[in-house]
Amino acid sequence: MSDLKNAVRYAQVILDIPLALPLDYSLAGLDAGRAQVGHRCVVPLGRGVRVGVIVGTSDAVAIDAQRIKPVSRVLDEITPLAPDWLQLTQFAADYYQHSWGEVALPSLPRMLRSVPGARFAQSIARMRTRAGARWSESAAPRVELTAEQTAAIDAVTRTTGFASHLLFGITGSGKTEVYLAAIANALKSSPTAQALLLVPEINLTPQLESLLQARFPNERVLALHSNLPDAERAAAW
């Protein structure tokens, strides 16, 4: 029992470097139970330290354990990165012939892929406070739908599984109402359901964000685009 309790576990970590396979690091001196797949961690690399993502754990490694460096710190201030996200980044890495870490790490907000400073924990606490807030405005009044809008909404909401639809209409013809109805239908399908709405221009984001907040007052609405400051991007993430 003592040997099992004191046994060293290892973590397989991906980094933003061009290596085909994850690197092995020891979890000696750390609570191995805190090192879950999807957690970020700080590890030594060369003469410096880097932030990586744990993609596996094991009780043994294929090389001499004496050569393996320890994980410096497990960054568990936020929940582990989701399995679906890890799977998506691994698929993208394979498809574009890059290492997994070269795809996964750059896709994170800058604050989450940098070695945290002394104020990082305070920043995370502030982000949680902002992200945990719910919009409480009254729901926007429903718009009277036209026959064409109703037909389009029926066609979209009848679809189960993945499908693509081409919605044609000039500016101001009411396409947004169809999108909102599709989002509402998706959100009702599951307590954990989410909806992603892509906008062609950053300048349209504030107007659309306000519309979504009014239409879905009990849902969390987050915006991501290239003009967001690092702190806001991390908070949205």
Image: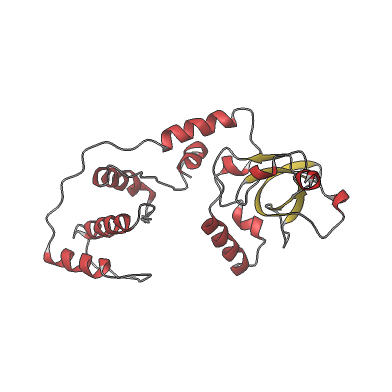
**Mark count:** 0
Residue 117 x, y percent position in the rendering: 64, 31
Between 170 and 174, the one nearer to me in the picture = 174
Answer left or right for 155 relative to 109: left
Residue 5 in which image quadrant: top right
Residue 97 x, y percent position in the rendering: 65, 67
Residue at x 21%, y 43% (from the top left corner): 139
Give the answer, above or below, for where 148 lies relative to 79. below
Residue 141 x, y percent position in the rendering: 15, 46
Answer left or right for 69 relative to 209: right
Residue at x 67%, y 61% (from the top left corner): 99
Give the answer, above or below, for where 236 lies relative to 57. above
Give the answer, above or below, for where 163 lies relative to 222. below
Q: Kindly give the residue lying farthest to the front in the view shown.
A: 1
Residue 56 x, y percent position in the rendering: 67, 55
Answer left or right for 106 relative to 217: right
Residue 164 in which image quadrant: bottom left
Between 202 and 108, the one nearer to me in the picture = 108
Residue at x 11%, y 55% (from the top left corner): 144
